[in-house]
């Protein structure tokens, strides 16, 4: 391997940590800029975010960031101070942990875990702990309602999310994300291996389920009941200001980034493109993955900006009566076909 | 409804005392106390995005379910009824512009025609036509905002911006005719301040096309959306009889199936008798039907404006009135169909330059009086849907 340089494990660890620590805020900023500021402005005829800085409002994000840094750090008098301060960190931490297992090239993966997808979905649920902490410690009724909604939502949506990935796992025969990518790269659709076998073609139901459930996991419209700015005035974030609020913001968009990456890896072939192997794949891989995850994120944010919000009980009945049965049927059919073909 | 700062009786904190006779022994009482989750009192407002201003709702919650809700109003009370007693008639129009600030022009018309009735004069036909056009334009502006904002309150961000964007065309029209975007203060007793500017009629015609397009967009984007239907159908049902009993009026009442529109059924005013329009109703009475009725009424208003633009006669816009307006003694009640519902003025004159007493019947005040009944047993998100569907303006409640 040309790229495999002689470096010690300490340096490797440091580099890996640095990569994860930069990728998530960077990803959050990219998604925030591309979709929240630019795509939303175009879709909704907003004039404000297109103005600052001259060309296409490029300065808006910098301005927003500076604004958050200047804001006073307010803590409610009755807040549980330690928990209140820790909550944003817990939310962001879970986002960092997800990215550790996402492969960006044949050799570019922070930690090639054998239980990769299982681990990613497990740590993604950690953010709800942070949300619960924020909601409880804020000493605010709106925040409390929001945190409880968030917990209820987690229980309803973790299951369809998992069931959606089971189809992929059956087809690939592994939980390891790197091997799932390889299975797609080397696979064949009914004997034709021209573009490999991106699982979106065979697992289209799974892909749709995954996107819907991920939308709920990320608390994005139509499942943004925990945030619900028109009812709960931004819910668990209501008492947070300045830098702590920025942490929630990074957590929100960073998790969206991570989930888009997982979806791209599971269903769109991750870093692989047909005809590129070896060192070239290591170099192109991150960009290919980025392009694919942006396409998935575009779908997520398109839905987010278009749809109204469901009610909490409607979300529960949608999850338990529609998504979970569909997920189970999908697994059944995938299993039968896997054995039969 | 209580109008003071204290919640009405019945919304005090839950009573945990237990009748000893109903319990077999103390342990059972203990269990009942411990498992009783108790109510939570949630203060929606006076600063809350769902209340369009400073309405305060004291909501008693069991989980997410509303046990009772008390609207507390008066945070924006400006005492207009009293102030009018110290103003001359032309000065009063400035005040009543601020009652329902989204459709100010429509507020002016009934008061001015009340004064005209007392003086026994009538505005010239051209002025009547322009008044009709501007009234319908302010109705369109108000409803476009509603059509967008209802989406926002149910969670969809995009329609709100479309509503604001398309309303801008109407506000530009009102501004170029009257000089004011929100508070035109354009009516004079006996006519209007000015004639329309050059090219205004053509501008208005093209703006109506924007309104039709906007209505199509809202029909596709909001009304046709499954989630919107799931959130609004069957939520906040006002039975027709109860609505009438509470004094609910306007589109809210028509959405309950009551076929009653003052433009058609009331005393003939402006040029409405000459216009051909349909009064839309919906049998369901829920939030969804309120959206449906307002959407159709927006289209109907645009059609009415087009009819007026075709039929508008030439001529003066002002009759001869004395320089200092003195209104003869007498009493008169004038009511109009405003965007928010029935809006009326009871004007008592003792023959001076200003009114002796003015009673303002504003639509929103009566419309929200049904809230305590309507909000019982719904979920917190439905509270927002119902508030958005009733569509009130705080200035119209508190005056």
Image (spheres, grey):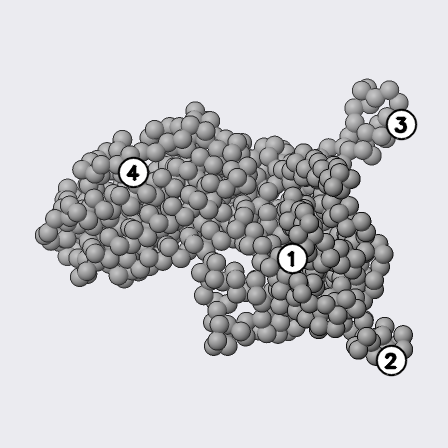
Q: Residues under labels 2 and 4: Cα distance?
A: 88 Å
* Residue A109 visible somewhere in the drawing: yes
Corner quadrant of residue B241: top left
Q: In 3D space, how far apart are the residues under numbered discs 4 and 3 (Cα atoms)? A: 64 Å
**Residue A194 disc label:** 1
Tag in front: 3 or 1:
1
Cα gap from disc 3 to disc 2, whole angstroms: 72 Å
Residue A14 at what x, y percent from top left? 84, 75
Q: Which residue is mark 2?
A: A6
**Is residue A262 visible in the rendered structure shown here?**
no
> Is B230 on the left or on the right of A258, as rendered?
left
User: Which class describes the residues within 10 Å of circle 3: few (<14), some (14-19), or many (20+)?
Assistant: few
Considering every residue shown, the one lying at the far front of the view is A191
Residue B146: x, y in percent?
A: 43, 47
Return the chain for callout 1: A
Label 4, residues with CA under 10 Å away: few <14, some 14-19, many ≥20: many
Reply above or below: B350 against B174: above
> Which is closer to the viewer, label 3 or label 2?
2
In the image, which is nearer the foreground, mark 1 or mark 4? 1
Disc 2 secondary structure class: loop
Q: Check disc 4 and report the residue beneath it.
A: B335
Q: Which residue is mark 3?
A: B27
Left-right relation of A207 to B54 = right
State the SS at label 3.
helix
Could you say where residue A104 lies in the image, as x and y percent from the top left? 73, 66
């Amino acid at each position: 391997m040309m790229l495999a340089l002689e470096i010690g494990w300490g340096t490797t660890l440091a580099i890996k940590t640095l990569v994860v620590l930069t990728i998530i805020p960077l990803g959050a900023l990219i998604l925030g800029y591309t979709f929240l500021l630019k795509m939303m402005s175009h879709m909704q005829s907003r004039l404000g975010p297109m103005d600052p800085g001259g060309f296409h409002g490029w300065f808006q994000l910098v301005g927003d960031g500076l604004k958050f840094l200047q804001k006073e750090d307010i803590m409610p008098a009755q807040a549980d101070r330690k928990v209140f301060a820790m909550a944003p960190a817990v939310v962001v931490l879970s986002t960092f942990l997800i990215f550790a297992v996402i492969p960006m090239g044949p050799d570019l993966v922070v930690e090639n875990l054998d239980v990769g997808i299982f681990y990613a979905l497990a740590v993604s649920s950690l953010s709800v702990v942070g949300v619960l902490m924020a909601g409880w410690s804020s000493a605010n009724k709106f925040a409390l309602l929001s945190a409880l909604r968030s917990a209820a939502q987690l229980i309803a949506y973790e299951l369809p999310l998992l069931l959606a990935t089971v189809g992929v796992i059956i087809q690939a025969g592994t939980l390891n994300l790197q091997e799932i990518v390889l299975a797609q790269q080397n696979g064949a659709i009914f004997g034709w291996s021209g573009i490999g076998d991106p699982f979106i073609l065979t697992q289209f139901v799974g892909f749709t389920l995954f996107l819907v459930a991920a939308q709920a996991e990320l608390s994005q419209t139509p499942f943004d009941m925990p945030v619900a700015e028109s009812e709960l005035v931004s819910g668990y974030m209501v008492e947070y200001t300045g830098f702590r609020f920025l942490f929630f913001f990074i957590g929100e968009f960073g998790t969206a980034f991570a989930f888009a990456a997982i979806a791209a890896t599971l269903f769109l072939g991750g870093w692989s493109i047909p005809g590129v192997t070896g060192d070239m794949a290591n170099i192109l891989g991150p960009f290919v993955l980025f392009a694919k995850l942006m396409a998935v994120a575009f779908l997520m944010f398109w839905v987010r900006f278009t749809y109204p919000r469901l009610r909490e009980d409607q979300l529960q009945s949608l999850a338990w009566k529609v998504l979970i049965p569909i997920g189970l049927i999908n697994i059944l059919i995938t299993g039968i076909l896997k054995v039969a073909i | 409804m209580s109008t003071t700062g204290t919640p009405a009786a019945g919304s005090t904190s839950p009573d945990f005392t237990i009748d000893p006779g109903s319990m077999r022994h103390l342990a059972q009482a203990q269990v009942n106390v411990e498992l009783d989750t108790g109510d939570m009192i949630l203060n929606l407002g006076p600063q809350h995005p769902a209340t369009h201003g400073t309405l305060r709702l004291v909501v008693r919650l069991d989980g997410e379910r509303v046990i009772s809700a008390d609207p507390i109003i008066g945070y924006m009370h400006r005492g207009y009824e009293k102030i009018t007693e110290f103003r001359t008639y032309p000065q009063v129009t400035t005040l009543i512009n601020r009652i329902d600030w989204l459709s100010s022009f429509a507020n002016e018309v009934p008061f001015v025609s009340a004064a005209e009735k007392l003086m026994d004069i009538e505005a010239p036909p051209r002025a009547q036509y322009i008044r009709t056009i501007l009234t319908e334009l302010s109705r369109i502006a108000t409803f476009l905002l509603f059509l967008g904002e209802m989406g926002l309150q149910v969670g969809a961000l995009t329609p709100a911006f479309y509503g604001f964007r398309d309303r801008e065309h109407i506000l530009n029209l009102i501004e170029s005719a009257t000089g004011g975007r929100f508070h035109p203060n354009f009516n004079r007793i006996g006519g209007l301040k000015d004639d329309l500017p050059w090219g205004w009629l053509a501008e208005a015609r093209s703006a109506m096309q924007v309104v039709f397009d906007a209505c199509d967009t809202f029909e596709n984007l909001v009304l046709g959306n499954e989630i919107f239907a799931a959130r609004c159908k069957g939520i906040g049902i006002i039975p027709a009889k109860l609505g009438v009993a509470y004094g609910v009026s306007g589109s809210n009442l028509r959405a309950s199936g009551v076929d009653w529109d003052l433009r058609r059924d009331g005393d003939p005013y402006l040029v409405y008798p000459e216009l051909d329009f349909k009064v839309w109703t919906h049998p369901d009475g829920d939030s969804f039907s309120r959206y449906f009725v307002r959407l159709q009424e927006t289209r109907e208003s645009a059609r009415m404006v087009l009819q007026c633009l075709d039929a508008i006669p030439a001529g003066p816009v002002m009759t001869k009135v004395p320089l200092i307006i003195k209104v003869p003694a007498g009493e008169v009640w004038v009511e109009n169909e405003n965007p928010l519902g029935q809006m009326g003025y009871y004007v008592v004159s003792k023959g001076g330059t200003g009114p002796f007493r003015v009673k303002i019947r504003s639509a929103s005040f009566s419309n929200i009086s049904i809230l305590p009944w309507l909000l019982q047993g719904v979920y917190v998100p439905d509270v927002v849907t119902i508030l958005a569907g009733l569509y009130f303006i705080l200035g119209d409640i508190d005056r």
